[in-house]
Image (cartoon, rainbow, N blue to C red):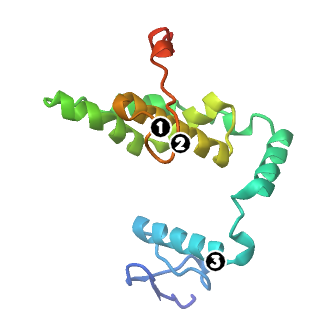
Amino acid sequence: MGLIIKKKCKHCHKLFIPDARNIKRQEYCHLPACRKASKADSQRRWLQKPQNHDHFRGAINCERVRQWRALHPGYWRRQKSGPDALQDLLNAKHSVIITDTFKSATSALQDLLILQPDVIIGLIANFTGSALQDDIATSVRRLQQLGRDILNPQNKGAHDGYQGSHYDPKGAQSAQAV
């Protein structure tokens, strides 16, 4: 029988028994907060390397991703096997009665966006036909300005250096339901 080695977690500072396959490198215990800290530390160390600074940015990397996607069409649209996760999430939520309608009308959409960023990014990628981060970021800025113009029509296009409004009230009146 071998000696059991315990190590001190770099996050919670409690003693833990590291996985036998990774005993020399494991620095964090199995607790969720410690695993999150381990991931953050790993990403920080990866981004500190000079060759990784612009790995996800710039025209060269966008072209690299476009070429990869051309070789793997529909990769990001593939359905995962198993039950429909969205259906499970929708059924599990409880209704909330909101009494202050004006306050909730301005904050409910923001709350939803904060809680479901992956859904928003997926919708933008679906509507634009591109899953590249640079393209999505451009669309997000344009949609954000459109939302500001809709919510505050007297200051159309006055935010973030935009010159004109993206809101067309004539188009909105004739818009069809999605």
Residue situated furthest bottom in the rendering? 3
Q: Is residue 19 above or below residue 92?
A: below
On the question of residue 136 being in view, the answer is yes
On the question of residue 94 being in view, the answer is no
Q: CA distance from mark 3 to mark 1?
A: 34 Å
Looking at the rendered structure, which numbered label has been put on residue 145?
A: 1
What amino acid type is highlighted by mark number 2?
Answer: Arg
Q: Earlier in the sequence, mark 3 or mark 2?
A: 3
Where is mark 3, residue-wise? 48
Residue 58 lies in what quarter of the image? bottom right
Residue at 42% of width from left, 79% of height from top?
11
Mark 3 against mark 2, which lies toward the viewer? 2
Q: How many marks?
A: 3
Residue at 46% of width from left, 75% of height from top?
29
Q: Residues within 10 Å of mark 2 (few under 14, many from 20)?
A: few
- Label 2 secondary element: helix
What amino acid type is highlighted by mark number 1?
Answer: Gln
The percent position of residue 87, horizontal first and vertical second, equals 45, 28
Residue at 54% of width from left, 68% of height from top?
39
Q: CA distance from mark 2 to mark 1?
A: 6 Å
Residue at 51% of width from left, 47% of height from top?
161
- Label 1 secondary element: helix
Q: Nearer the viewer, residue 86 or 138?
A: 138
Where is mark 2, residue-wise? 141
In this rendering, position of residue 22 left or right of residue 72? left
What amino acid type is highlighted by mark number 3?
Answer: Gln
The percent position of residue 47, horizontal first and vertical second, equals 63, 72
Q: Are marks 3 and 1 in contact (CB under 8 Å)?
A: no
Q: Are marks 2 and 1 in contact (CB under 8 Å)?
A: yes
